[in-house]
Image: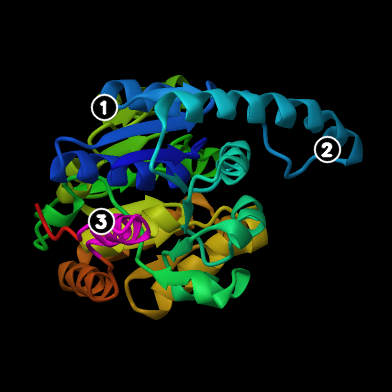
Amino acid sequence: MRLLLAGGGTGGHLFPAVALAQLLLKQDETAAVQFVGTERGLESRLLPKLGLPLATVDMVGVVGRGLRGKLELLPKLFKSVVQAHKILGGFQPDLVVGVGGYVSVPVLLMAKMKGIPYLIHEQNAIPGLSNRLLGRWAKLICLSVAESSAGFPGTKTVVTGNPLRQGFDDIAAEISDPGTLLIFGGSRGARAINQAVVEMLPLIKTWPVKPVILHQTGEEDFHQVQQAYRDSGFDPDQVVPFIDDMSKAYSEASLVICRAGATTLAELTVCGRAAILIPFPHAAGDHQTANAKALEKAGAAKLLPQNELEADRLAALVKELLEDREGLKNMAEKGRQIGFPGAAERILNECRGVLALPQVEGI
């Protein structure tokens, strides 16, 4: 199979595509993959480290732009469609998979024009604009959660779960003691979380037993947060701009503070890790809050809205959870009960079904 993966910008769109590519190459040494993204997205930094090929188009998002901004977008869309034509012509894919984000628009449009079949993977409960528009021509729409089916033609949808990168399915259920307090706000970081944690450090310093911390800040806040750790008497090496080996970070964590994006929730539930979820309040349709409420209802996480995010409240919640080891284990187990492992394998077999190729199980 020659598989082209279109989308990216953020980890939520990129990581599922990486999972598909890694598994396909592991299953079939004759397969070939090609990513299409932008020079500005996370893909331009991550994919070279993983040895995965990236071609770029000059496309930008439409969300949040006024009428004038949308009109100014038309020349970029035309240019990116021409670029997509060249990329598709050079790689000659059997199939294209769109994983969401504005970069998938010109690629899937050109795939439609060239008669190349494509699938869509939707990560969120509330489908994104790009996927909703392009779903009408897709051969199949793979859903992370059944709730997002309302945004697509019902005959084309299948619930597959959200693909996770290599290593996540192998993380042991046991939570190490004392374990790590893992903090992150997505691949780009989250300023609100970073600031609350910085303000929480003096409170943690007074605890009889201080947790080991691993804090991913994103590039923009890295130096400021690292200095705050140093000033508060904490090891500045506990702060990193980006965690390359996320499965290792989860395996060592006993509690996670994070946003509530679809990929993050898939990771938490498959790994079985308790979390304090702080949804990004400006996500499309406020879908992160809906995600977080579902996990809290299942008993696998605690929801802390960003407008209620204060250092003393966050510190009290962290302390309460870390001191209740049985409670942490119970939350982790409830998360695992609603996890959806094996999503990458299911989606690749759906791809093979579209191409009338034999199904593959495991490796």
Residue type at numbered disc 2: Lys
Q: Is residue 260 visible?
A: no
Compared with 51, 6 (above or below) is below
Residue 110 occupies which quadrant of the picture? top right
Q: How is the image coloured?
A: rainbow
How far, Cα to Cα, is label 1 from label 3? 27 Å
Pointer 1 and pointer 2: residues touching (CB < 8 Å)? Answer: no
Q: Which residue is mark 1?
A: 50
Q: Earlier in the sequence, mark 1 or mark 2?
A: 1
Residue at 41% x, 32% y: name it: 92
Q: Viewer-nearest of labels 1 and 3?
A: 3
Q: In the picture provided, is 210 more to the left or to the right than 63?
A: left
Marked residue nearer the N-terminal end (1 or 3) = 1
Q: Relative to residue 98, is residue 220 depicted above or below?
A: above
> Mark 3 — residue?
357
Query: Which residue position holds label 2?
Result: 70
Camera-nearest residue between 189 and 136? 136
The tag on residue 289 is none
Q: Range of the magenta residues?
A: 341-358
Question: Residue 117, how many percent across, how many down?
Answer: 48, 50
The verdict on residue 254 being magenta is no
Label the magenta part by its dominant secondary structure: helix
Task: Mark 3 vs mark 2: give the one in front.
Answer: 3
